[in-house]
Image (cartoon, rainbow, N blue to C red):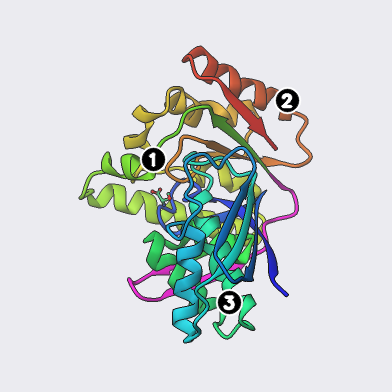
Amino acid sequence: EGVYVRIPASTANLGPGFDTLGMALSLYAWIGMKEADETAIRLYGNEMEGIPTDKNNLVYQVAQMAFREAGVHLPELEISMYSDIPLTRGLGSSASAIVGALYAANALIGSPLPDARLLDMATAIEDHPDNVGASLFGGFITAVWDGEHADYVRMEPHEDLEVLVVIPDFQLKTSEARKVLPEKIGRKDAVYNISRSSLLVAALAQGRLDLIGRAMSDRLHQPYRAGLVPGMAEILERAVEHGALGIALSGAGPTLLALVDRHSLRKKELESYLLNTMKAEGISASARW
Ligand code: HSE
C-alpha cells in the first residue's frame, strides 16, 4: 500500500508567455505517501531547510485538500519527500510540491479526481497555471486561468530542443519579483507580447526553431525584473550571439533558461558565456543541461 510519485521541475513564461507558458524540466522531486496511525513527515536532500515536518507541511496540507475534494477522510499520513529542485530559484519547486501532493493523494484513494480538476486545484493555490501545468502534464504547456478553471493544451517539445539553465547561488522570492511589475502596461507593449507569445507557441508546434530567438522576447516582466538579477539584461541581449536558440528568465528568476539546438557545436561556448557574464557581476552560478 502507499504511492510514490516523481514530479518534474518547470520553467514558466519562456519570455513572452507571462503566467501562461510552461515547460517541464528533467530535474525532479519524489513524494511517497501512505495512510498511517500517526502523521510522520520525512524530508531528504539538500534543499529542505526550513520546511515544516508537522501538519503545517505543504504536501500534507495539499493532500488534505485533495481528500476533502474527493469526500474522503484520511487525516494521518506518512509522507516522505526528496527533491533535487533548488528552492526559490524560478524552477517551480513549490509547484512541484503542490502537484506531487495532489497527484499522490488522489492516487492513494484510487484517483477519483480527473487530472483537469487537479490542475484547477493546483492553479488556485499557485494563482497561475504555468508551473503547475508543466509539472502535472510534463512537456510544454500553454494554459489560461479564469480564476476557477484552467484551459490548457500540452505539446511534446521538439526533439532537437535542449535546455540549459544557469542557476545563480542566491534566492529570489516570486512575491518580490512580482512586486516590481507595473499594474498597467501600454497597448504597444501588450501587442509586443501577444505577438511574440503567439509566434513562440506556433513555432514550437511546427518545429520552426529558427523563430524561437526573436519570439522569446518580452516587455511585460523581464525588463522590470532585470534589476534583480545581475548580468540578466546583457545575457538576454547577447546569448543568441553565443549559440542559444532563445533565452529567458526562468519563471520569476533568478535562474536563466536557454533553449539550445541539441546538435549545436557551441554548447560549451554558450555555457561559458553565461557563467562568465554572471561572474563578472560577482554572481556565482551553476549550469545544468
Ligand atoms: N509566471 C510566474 C511569474 C512564475 O513570472 O511570476 C513564477 O512562479
Q: Is residue 158 above or below residue 246?
A: below
- 7, 162: nearer the viewer: 7
Beta carbon of the mark 1 residue lies under 8 A of ligand 1? no
- 120, 234: nearer the viewer: 120
**Relative to residue 49, is residue 149 drawn left or right?**
left
Q: Quadrant of the N terminus?
A: bottom right
Q: Where is residue 201, by image quadrant?
A: bottom right
Q: Quick one: label 2 or label 1, which is nearer the N terminus?
A: 1
Residue 52: image location, x then y, percent: 47, 50
Residue 189: image location, x then y, percent: 30, 47
Q: How far apart, in angstroms, are the residues tagged by discs 3 and 1?
A: 29 Å
- Secondary structure beneath dot 3 equals helix
Q: Is residue 161 magenta?
A: yes
Q: Magenta stretch?
A: 143-162
Q: Please report the residue visible at 49 percent of the width from the left and 52 percent of the height from the top.
A: 94
Residue 266: image location, x then y, percent: 73, 28
Q: Quadrant of the C terminus?
A: top right
Q: Quick one: label 3 or label 1, which is nearer the N terminus?
A: 3
Q: Residues within 10 Å of mark 1 (few under 14, many from 20)?
A: some
Residue at the disc numbered 1: 173
Residue at the disc numbered 3: 106
Q: Please report the residue visible at 35 percent of the width from the left and 35 percent of the height from the top.
A: 225
Q: Which mark is residue 200?
A: none
Beta carbon of the mark 2 residue lies under 8 A of ligand 1? no
Q: Which amino acid type is shown beneath numbered disc 2? A: Lys
Q: Where is residue 197, by image quadrant?
A: bottom left
Q: Quick one: label 3 or label 2, which is nearer the N terminus?
A: 3
**Relative to residue 220, is residue 196 drawn left or right?**
right
Residue at the disc numbered 2: 268
Q: Please report the residue visible at 54 percent of the width from the left and 64 percent of the height from the top.
A: 39
Q: Which amino acid type is shown beneath numbered disc 3? A: Asn
